Image (tube, rainbow, N blue to C red):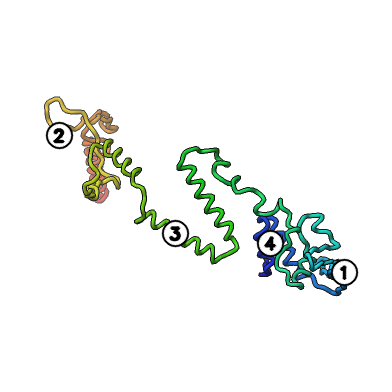
């Protein structure tokens, strides 16, 4: 979103909720960029300003009348934006900028759209999650409320917020490192652990790296076999082979198959001899 870096814009951010402050900041920005004063007239205790507004859609110029009373900073505009919507218009912010008015008057801040319209107690943990009557819960809620009030009071002061954050950090380091912390609860926890484990936690504890375990890779294929009846080891026992049918000798055997059958070898040998004899007879003729 575009910003003007005007003091009145920062004041609007402090006053309104996020949604409304966004709309008000748009009016402030457009009042600076698209509005300008063309004429003024004195009027009783104040002044009448004629403000022109450039319309980018149709390249037209509209004129609005703003009446400002400097005694009480009351203001009104012919567009009636405050009456219709509830926050000041860009024409009034243009007049405020010319008169160096840096804060929005309280009478033009609608309470229902201000940051502080709801009491801080509504945002407490008790209101959101129920009432906790324990002493530690009450102390915790009190601490959170105090911190919230401090942050809200310093929300527009960057230096104050930084200083408050540093003080909180110092208090945190003091409590967690070397500060006076109540060790009663810690001692009770140590006693409960010692009673559960049956050992003392006061001695020094030495930790070593665990032994390496080969649990990665494919590993070796080991098949479990039934224990032998004669007392020999499992490594010496091999299961018997299943007989297979040899298609050459047409017998169920375990030592060979049709590729290395003796009958096949003899048949191949006799076939070779017949070929040799036939070739020799052809040569003789």
Neighbor class of circle 1 (other Cα within 10 Å; few <14, some 14-19, many 20+) is few
C-alpha span from label 3 to label 4: 31 Å
Residue nearer the viewer, 9 or 263: 9
Estimate the spatial distance between the alpha carbons at disc 2 and disc 4, rounded to whole Å: 93 Å
Q: CA distance from mark 1 to mark 2?
A: 122 Å
Horizontal and vertical percent position of residue 119: 63, 48
Q: Which residue is mark 4?
A: 12
Percent of width and height locating residue 49: 84, 70
Secondary structure beneath label 1: loop
Residue found 84% across the figure and 66% down from its top: 67
- Viewport quadrant of the N terminus: bottom right
Q: Which residue is mark 3?
A: 169
- Mark 3 touching mark 4, by CB under 8 A? no
Residue 237 lies left or right of residue 275; in this view the side is left
Q: Nearer the viewer, mark 1 or mark 2?
A: 1
Label 4: which secondary element: helix
């Amino acid at each position: 979103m575009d910003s003007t870096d005007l003091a009145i814009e920062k004041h609007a951010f402090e006053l309104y909720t996020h949604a409304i402050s966004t709309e008000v900041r748009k009016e402030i920005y457009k009042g600076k960029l698209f509005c300008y004063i063309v004429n003024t007239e004195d009027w009783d205790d104040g002044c009448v300003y004629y403000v022109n507004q450039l319309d980018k859609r149709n390249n037209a110029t509209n004129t609005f009348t703003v009446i400002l009373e400097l005694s009480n900073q009351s203001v009104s505009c012919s567009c009636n934006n405050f009456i219709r919507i509830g926050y000041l218009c860009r024409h009034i912010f243009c007049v405020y900028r010319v008169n160096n008015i840096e804060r929005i008057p309280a009478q033009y801040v609608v309470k229902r759209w201000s940051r502080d319209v709801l009491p801080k107690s509504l945002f407490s943990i008790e209101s959101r999650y129920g009432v906790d009557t324990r002493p530690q819960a009450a102390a915790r809620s009190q601490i959170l409320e105090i911190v919230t009030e401090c942050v809200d009071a310093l929300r527009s002061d960057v230096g104050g917020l930084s200083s408050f954050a540093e003080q909180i950090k110092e208090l945190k380091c003091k409590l967690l490192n070397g500060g006076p912390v109540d060790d009663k609860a810690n001692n009770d926890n140590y006693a409960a652990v010692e009673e559960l484990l049956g050992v003392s936690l006061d001695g020094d504890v030495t930790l070593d790296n665990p032994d390496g375990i080969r649990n990665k890779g494919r590993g070796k294929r080991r098949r479990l076999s039934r224990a032998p009846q004669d007392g020999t080891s499992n490594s010496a026992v091999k299961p018997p082979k299943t007989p297979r049918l040899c298609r050459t000798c047409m017998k169920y055997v375990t030592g060979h198959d049709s590729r290395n059958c003796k009958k096949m070898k003899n048949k191949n040998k006799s076939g070779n001899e017949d070929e040799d004899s036939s070739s020799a007879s052809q040569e003789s003729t």
